[in-house]
């Protein structure tokens, strides 16, 4: 099949108080996928969100990888708090064939510090299919979510945080994912390097 396609989408940033929001400028069709919406929020705490809606426009199951990465001033951390993932997936073509699943053994959600995963999450019930819908029928929507309120992790010094979402999605179907990742203690001083926000999505089949 086709090799990976990398998309570095254009978007706009806005700030309200101490929270900056990046938003995809417009729905972005590329070979094999429509990125219907995408946004990321970031704050000096620090935390980051990665919220995306995609549609697989091919006749094949595809693998998606969506990453948001944020450079931050160096600070010590030893705990993950208030971190989660929620998935809503729809049999958009109404053919009663729906699959939202892991790509191999890779977790759907990876919260990263300095490029290394310190929190992995999989929403329960994978793979999500039409049988996962509250009322199963062609064209139905299935949902699943999980998260952690507080989790001690190996202490370290962070210079970047991020969320990587990796998943497979059946042909003609759509998936919306919301996710959040936060580490503590909070940095004492310094501003986020907002110009360093990086977002990318890759897909392959």
Image (spheres, grey):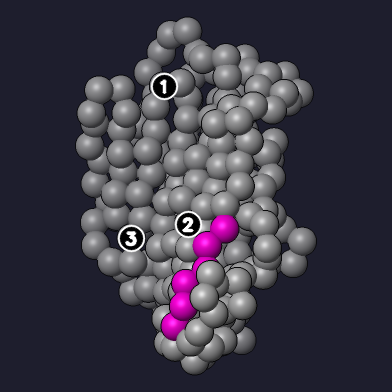
State the quadrant of the C terminus: bottom right
Image coordinates for residue 131, horizontal then vertical, percent:
61, 77
- For the residue pair 105 and 85, the one nearer the viewer reads as 85
Q: Of the residues under marks 2 and 3, which one precedes in the sequence?
A: 3
The reply to whether residue 5 is visible in this rendering is: no
Where is mark 1, residue-wise? Answer: 44
Which residue is at a point 39% across and 33% down the rendered structure image? Answer: 42
Which residue is at a point 47% across and 25% down the rendered structure image? Answer: 46
Image coordinates for residue 38, horizontal then vertical, percent:
36, 55
Image coordinates for residue 33, horizontal then vertical, percent:
43, 75
Crowd tier of the residue under label 3, counting other residues whose Cα lies within 10 Å: few below 14, some 14–19, many 20 or above: some
Q: Of the residues under marks 1 and 3, which one precedes in the sequence?
A: 3
The answer for how far apart the CA atoms under marks 1 and 2 are is 23 Å
Crowd tier of the residue under label 2, counting other residues whose Cα lies within 10 Å: few below 14, some 14–19, many 20 or above: many
On residue 37, the disc is 3
Where is mark 2, residue-wise? Answer: 177
- Give the foreground label among 2 and 3: 2
The answer for how far apart the CA atoms under marks 2 and 3 are is 10 Å
Q: Secondary structure at mark 2?
A: strand
- For the residue pair 124 and 76, the one nearer the viewer reads as 124
State the quadrant of the N terminus: bottom right
Q: Which residues are magenta?
A: 139-144
Which residue is at a point 46% across and 36% down the rendered structure image? Answer: 48
């Amino acid at each position: 099949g086709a090799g990976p396609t990398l998309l570095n989408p254009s978007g706009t940033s806005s700030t309200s108080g101490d929270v900056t929001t990046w938003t995809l400028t417009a729905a972005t069709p590329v070979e094999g996928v429509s990125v219907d919406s995408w946004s990321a929020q970031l704050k000096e705490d620090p935390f980051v969100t990665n919220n995306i809606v995609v549609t697989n426009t091919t006749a094949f199951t595809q693998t998606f990888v969506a990453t948001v990465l944020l450079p931050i001033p160096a600070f010590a951390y030893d705990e993950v708090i208030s971190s989660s993932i929620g998935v809503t997936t729809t049999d958009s073509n109404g053919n009663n064939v729906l699959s939202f699943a892991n790509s191999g053994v890779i977790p759907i959600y990876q919260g990263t510090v300095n490029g290394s995963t310190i929190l992995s999450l999989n929403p329960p019930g994978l793979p999500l299919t039409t049988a996962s819908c509250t009322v199963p029928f062609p064209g139905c929507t299935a949902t699943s979510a999980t998260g952690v309120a507080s989790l001690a992790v190996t202490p370290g010094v962070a210079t970047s945080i991020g969320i990587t979402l990796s998943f497979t999605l059946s042909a003609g179907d759509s998936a919306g994912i919301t996710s959040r990742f936060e580490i503590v203690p909070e940095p004492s001083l310094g501003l986020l390097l907002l110009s360093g926000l990086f977002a990318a999505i890759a897909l392959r089949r």
